[in-house]
Image (spheres, rainbow, N blue to C red):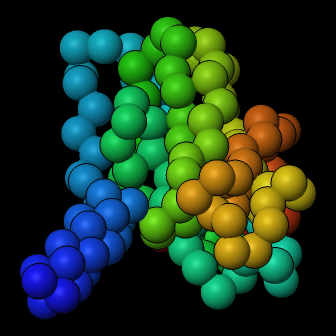
Amino acid sequence: MNSIRSAMIYGMVFVTCLAGCTSIEPTQPNSSLHPVTVTIYRDSALQGSLSYAYVGWDNKYYNKLATKQYTVFSVPEGLQEFRVKAHADVANQLTLSVSRHSSICLMVRVNPENIVGVNWLVPSYELKQIECLSSQKIDAYEKV
């Protein structure tokens, strides 16, 4: 009886761990839509620097960023929900209306409301729309 109960508990823990994991998918923008370039930077804050920030849109993740890294990808114009999260964390979303006549730049930052150890309740990271970095400032970041 105890072995069955133990097996059930370990099984639930295993399934819970799998449900929180994040996978990265290749980006394949639809060329028939008007693509908009999006750049996502990750700041250099020490807090949260030991984990990757997974970034994406449309309920999928397309890249992971360490501190002082950035990525560029294309999304279709219109209302888009951008996402960021740590590996086994709840996601934080930022919904923006994107137009092919503008560039979108976002910064991944540590969520100031995050409390270490309760990442299943409060997202570790947040996205903020920022002015795109100049070529001098972007040199301090690594493109991934």
Q: How many marks?
A: 0
| 72 with respect to 140 (left or right) | left
Where is residue 94 shown, x and y percent of the image?
A: 65, 31
In the displayed structure, does residue 50 sit left or right of residue 7? right
Q: Is residue 61 above or below residue 139?
A: above
**On-image quarter of the N terminus:** bottom left
Outermost residue, front direction? Answer: 1
Is 34 drawn above or below residue 61 in the view shown?
above
Q: Quadrant of residue 100?
A: top right
**Outermost right residue:** 112
Is residue 135 among the parts visible in the rendering? Answer: no
Q: Along the line of sight, which residue is nearer the eye, 108 or 110?
A: 110
> x and y percent of residue 64 in the render?
47, 66
Q: Looking at the image, which residue is at 78% across and 41% down?
A: 128
Q: Does residue 2 appear to the left or right of 94 in the view shown? A: left
Question: Residue at position x 61%, y 13% from top?
Answer: 97
Residue 37: tell me if it is visible.
yes
Residue at 55% across, 74% down: 52
Q: Residue at x 53, y 12 (%)?
A: 79
Q: Position of residue 49 (x, y in %)?
A: 71, 82
Q: Position of residue 101 (x, y in %)?
A: 61, 14
